[in-house]
Amino acid sequence: MNTNRATVRVDIVSDVVCPWCAIGYYQLAAAARETAVELDVHWHPFELNPYMRDGGENLREHLAGKYGTTPAGSKRARARLTALGAELGFTFNYADDMRMFNTFRAHQLVDWAETQGKSHDTKMALFEAFFTHRQDVSDFDELARVAASVGLDEGAARGILESGERAQSVREKQSLWLERGIQGVPTMVFQGRHAVTGAQGVDQYGAALRQAVAA
């Protein structure tokens, strides 16, 4: 870490299948570069679809049932996200047959990766696995491959997930943030004090970082 730059801790409550969580992080990262701030990012779990069945659901059908999104509206939203992602250097690769999945196991992987100093890399790899490669982020094999891609032991990762030994830790962290009133993601908390919800854009995140440095 560059000690000549101010460091700001940012706690990010998010889900790996939340497109605005990916957008929000990449906006934050761009703001950090513009403001010469070093980010100390800590990821926290939130499930958008905690009752999603095994195998997931078609994404368009899921959005239609949950939010009333029309096919035309879905197409416009995907186009907007794809364009925003491209501007920030992230690839959204939507398709009509893309599926939405339960993310509880993915959060368990991030939770374990934190003990190995790899939570941020794992979170980034999960965003890419889901949005860029349209992988099933509830699948043991896929999650183990994600772990291996960031330098974690693939067999150990699979064993952790199959045993469910990080499940309670994730549940406790989810409950903590819910008790703090977090109901939408991404929510970013700067220096443990100032919370910002939603992907706010590079300029707004830059202002939040400058405020955190000045405080």
Image (spheres, grey):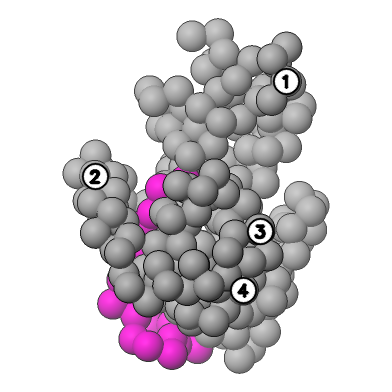
Closer to the N terminus: mark 2 or mark 3? 3
Please give the name of the residue rendered at 63% of the width and 38% of the height, measured from the top-left corner. 28
| Neighbourhood count class around disc 2 (C-alpha, 10 Å): few under 14, some 14–19, many 20 upward | some
Residue 168: image location, x then y, percent: 24, 59
**Where's the N terminus, which quadrant?**
top right
Please give the name of the residue rendered at 54% of the width and 44% of the height, measured from the top-left corner. 117
The residue that label 3 is drawn on is 150
Is 146 or 49 nearer to us in this picture? Answer: 146
Magenta-highlighted residues: 43-68
Please give the name of the residue rendered at 57% of the width and 49% of the height, measured from the top-left corner. 118
Give the residue type at disc 4: Arg
- Label number found at residue 145: 4
Mark in the foreground, 3 or 1: 3
User: Whole-Å distance between the Cαs marked 3 and 1?
Assistant: 22 Å
The residue that label 1 is drawn on is 2
As helix, strand or loop, the secondary structure at mark 3 comes to: loop
Please give the name of the residue rendered at 68% of the width and 38% of the height, measured from the top-left corner. 29
Is 114 or 64 nearer to us in this picture? Answer: 114
User: Whole-Å distance between the Cαs marked 2 and 3?
Assistant: 28 Å
In this rendering, the count of numbered labels is 4
As helix, strand or loop, the secondary structure at mark 1 comes to: loop
Residue 108: image location, x then y, percent: 39, 62
Give the residue type at disc 3: Val
| Neighbourhood count class around disc 4 (C-alpha, 10 Å): few under 14, some 14–19, many 20 upward | some
The residue that label 2 is drawn on is 176
The reply to whether residue 146 is in sight is no
Farthest-out residue, top: 214
The reply to whether residue 40 is in sight is yes
Closer to the N terminus: mark 3 or mark 4? 4
Residue 173: image location, x then y, percent: 29, 49
User: Whole-Å distance between the Cαs marked 2 and 4?
Assistant: 29 Å
